[in-house]
Amino acid sequence: VVLSGARVVNLMDRAAAWPGPGSLQMSGFTYENLVPRGPFPLAERLRWVSAATAEYQPEPYERLAAVLRASGEDEGAREVLLAKQRHRRASLPPAARLWGYAQDWTVAYGYRPGRAALWLAVLWAAGSLAFAQAAHRPVDAGRHPQWDPALYALDLLLPVIDFGQSGQWQLRGGWQWLSVALVLLGWVLATAVAAGATRLLRRG
């Protein structure tokens, strides 16, 4: 089935009517409304787009997302754009692919920003419980705040906010490595959130 360059207003179809991968081409195919004849869930729609894009092409995903958004299905549109990013990831070099996985696991490329808050909450709780057992020595014995493991963990996780804890205490051995790990994870989350927000702003 070759639909490249075709233009229709109402696309009336059935899930079982479309051919599989390698037998469908729709580069430049535009449509304004989806009018399925029978059940055609979004997962099937995504397989329909994937069948037409053995090599990554953003256009079919963006067209489907635009049509869903125009019909008020914003959540479905976000799922389509997320699938587009995952398909694109497979065509990237290894380093960029790893960064793509990091964005996917943390904030789903910006389409599920609440996931970052969940990761932060889990890491904060785990760090607070761990640092409550840590031996800590003040950097300046004569002048230091009261030790607060929860604030210390939060200070490490949020790279742009200073709660006045992380620079005041010396932790050694495994505790020091745990601190470094939380700092790195905090930066990864912050960068992934920023990248996702930028992508959403460009889309909007």
Image (cartoon, grey):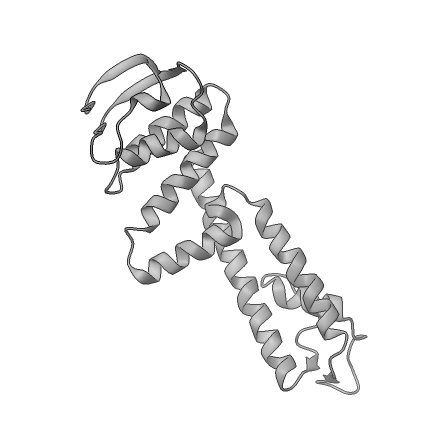
Q: Nearer the viewer, residue 142 or 44?
A: 44
Q: Residue furthest front?
A: 16
Q: How many marks?
A: 0
Question: Going 26% across and 33% down the picture, which residue do you hit?
Answer: 52
From the top left corner, tell me how far across and down residue 70 is, in percent.
44, 20
As drawn, 30 above or below 126: above
Residue 146, percent from left and from top:
81, 75
Query: What is the quadrant of the N terminus in the image?
Result: top left
Please indicate whether residue 23 sits to the left or right of residue 170 in the image: left
On screen, residue 83 above or below 163: above
Q: Is residue 3 left or right of residue 182?
A: left
Foreground residue among 98 and 144? 98
Q: Quadrant of residue 123?
A: bottom right
Residue at x 38% of width, y 46% of height: 86
Image coordinates for residue 172, horizontal then vertical, percent: 65, 86
Residue depicted at x 19% and y 22%? 5
Horizontal and vertical percent position of residue 204: 45, 33
Instruction: Place residue 56 in its image quadrant.
Output: top left
Quadrant housing residue 59: top left
Relative to 202, residue 17 above or below: above
Give the residue displayed 32% in from the left and 46% down from the top. Answer: 88
